[in-house]
Image (tube, rainbow, N blue to C red):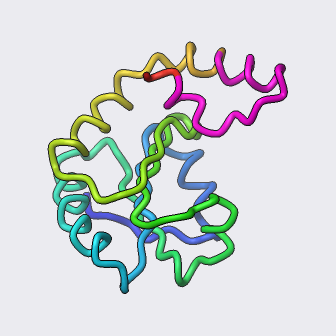
Amino acid sequence: MATVELTAADFEQTLSDNDIVLVDWWASWCGPCRMFAPVYEAASQTHGDVVFGKVDTEAERELSGAAQIMSIPTLMAFRDGILVHEQAGALPGPALEQVIAAVRELDMDHVRTRLAEQQVLGQDGRGAGAEVAR
């Protein structure tokens, strides 16, 4: 499966309709983004059960702001609509494969429990799954 362009119009629906979604936040002027693009595209060809989305931060400024993107490329991984991993910087192929494997192996009941605990305590639940995965 090839990568898909995501926009504000389809971002939330893509997350809710799919078990695992990776999102590459990028821009055409970004050198590291251009280096990461073929690695990301290659992974998309070997993991048919994962949606590989791309968000052009220049074209989708509001969406990028809502996601609090501070540097690019940034990779986000969502499982069951929950942000479980976020990392800035271009990844080599083996590191991307490790992220995919870790996202697949997450105990989502545990992630949801931790997220609920953080919300009760009034903490920011952003990336609760990534915290759990450590």
* Residue at 54%, 46% in the rendered image: 17
Relative vertical location of residue 36 with respect to residue 58 in this rendering, above or below:
above
Start-end of magenta stretch: 114-131
- The one nearer the camera, 99 or 18, is 99
How many tags in the picture? 0
Q: Position of residue 6 (x, y in %)?
A: 50, 68
* Residue at 54%, 54% in the rendered image: 14
Q: Position of residue 107 (x, y in %)?
A: 46, 16
- The one nearer the camera, 30 or 105, is 30
Magenta stretch, main secondary structure class: helix
* Residue at 47%, 76% in the rendered image: 56
Q: Position of residue 61 (x, y in %)?
A: 62, 77
Is residue 126 magenta-colored?
Answer: yes
- The one nearer the camera, 6 or 116, is 116
Q: Is residue 40 left or right of residue 11?
A: left
Name the quadrant of the C terminus: top left
* Residue at 66%, 15% in the rendered image: 113
Task: Using the rendered view, name the quadrant where residue 36 is placed.
Answer: bottom left
Is residue 85 magenta-colored?
Answer: no
Task: Using the rendered view, name the quadrant where residue 116 is placed.
Answer: top right
- The one nearer the camera, 45 or 54, is 54
Relative vertical location of residue 72 with respect to residue 45 in this rendering, above or below:
below
Q: Position of residue 114 (x, y in %)?
A: 64, 18
